[in-house]
Image (spheres, rainbow, N blue to C red):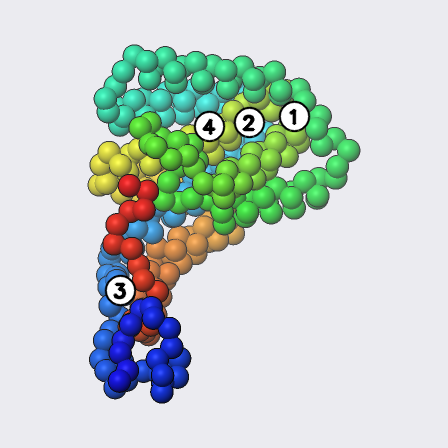
Amino acid sequence: MWRKVAYGGRQSGYDDNYTDESFLEEMVMNANVFKRYLLKVMIDSVSISQYLCIVALVVSTWILTLNLDIDESTLLKLDVGLLLVGFSVLLLTTCPFSLKLLTKYVLNISFFISGLYVLAPIYHTLTRSISSDSIWALAVSLLLVHLFLHDYSGSTIRPPGALNNPKLISNISLNASIVASVLVASRLPSRLHVFAIMLFSLQVFLFAPLITFCVKKYHFRLHLLFSFALMVVALSVTYQLHRMFFFVLLTLLVFVSIVCPYWLIRIQEYKFEINGPWDEAKLCFDITE
């Protein structure tokens, strides 16, 4: 007589792949399928739209600086303003606040700015022998790589109190944005211009994801309010800069915030998952404990 056993070898009179009539009685369909709601998915997509607007504002600043519509002093004032605002938000959203944490941030930022100022002359002459067309094509390609590999659910640097470091793909995305910033900065007319635009770009690409992550963790409604305000600012800036740039950004925001969530909800109807006794065994406890 055939018996259902996990181990014991082959049973005489039955093939290895034999199953009795009760085999399909334990089949379960769509047991692990998570039901998604359109509004929830649209809210979750706000983080992606928010970062698209941040990158759009960075590109707009690059273009205005390359056209000499923004001078060095204005860029430096913008850098100081962003640094103070970001630093304040980080301290307010980090609990508990400590003097040790404040000292650590001040020292790191001081070393960061000093090193960037020393390297500015090198960045200024780095791509002098390369044609401008090659520079723009490479910069655009690197920004696309940055957007494709960016971790939209986390931060590019480890937040205060976090146990895990950023993923490797997130670091690759960050490096792509830094190289793109260097390429753009090397086309500016003066070393002070290079220092100011590099400081601006690295502040955004390094610390903006950390600031938005801390704001989202601190208060979700504040995160939504900040994201919508950022979208309005980015759309208004791109509209004044170039109509084509504005329509591209608007199309991306609509696609990411409305079309993609609706698309995801629609394709969930066709998801079909079958589970049964043929599945691999799953541990019900954490193997690291």
CA gap between label 3 and label 2 equals: 47 Å
Q: Residues within 10 Å of mark 1 (few under 14, many from 20)?
A: many
Could you tell which of marks 4 and 2 lies nearer the N-terminus? 2
The residue at the point 68 percent across, 22 percent down is 122
Q: Amino acid under label 3? A: Asn
| Residue farthest to the right, as pictured | 129
Return the residue at label 1.
Answer: 123
Q: How crowded is mark 2: few (under 14 residues within 10 Å), some or many (20 or more)?
A: many
Residue 126 percent coordinates (x, y): 70, 28
Return the residue at label 2.
Answer: 198
CA gap between label 2 and label 1 equals: 9 Å
Dividing the picture into quadrants, the one containing residue 211 is top left
CA gap between label 1 and label 3 equals: 52 Å
Return the residue at label 3.
Answer: 32
Q: Mark 3 or mark 2, which is nearer to you?
A: 3
Could you tell which of marks 1 and 4 lies nearer the N-terminus? 1
Q: Do the residues labelled 2 and 1 touch (CB within 8 Å)?
A: yes
CA gap between label 1 and label 4 equals: 17 Å
Q: Are marks 3 and 4 in contact (CB under 8 Å)?
A: no
Examine the rendering and report whether any part of residue 63 can be seen.
Answer: no
The residue at the point 33 percent across, 68 percent down is 7
Q: Amino acid under label 4? A: Gln
On-image quarter of the N terminus:
bottom left
Between 6 and 25, the one lying in front of the other is: 6
Could you tell which of marks 3 and 2 lies nearer the N-terminus? 3
Mark number displayed over residue 203: 4
Q: In the image, is residue 129 above or below residue 259?
A: above
Q: In the image, is residue 103 above or below residue 234?
A: above
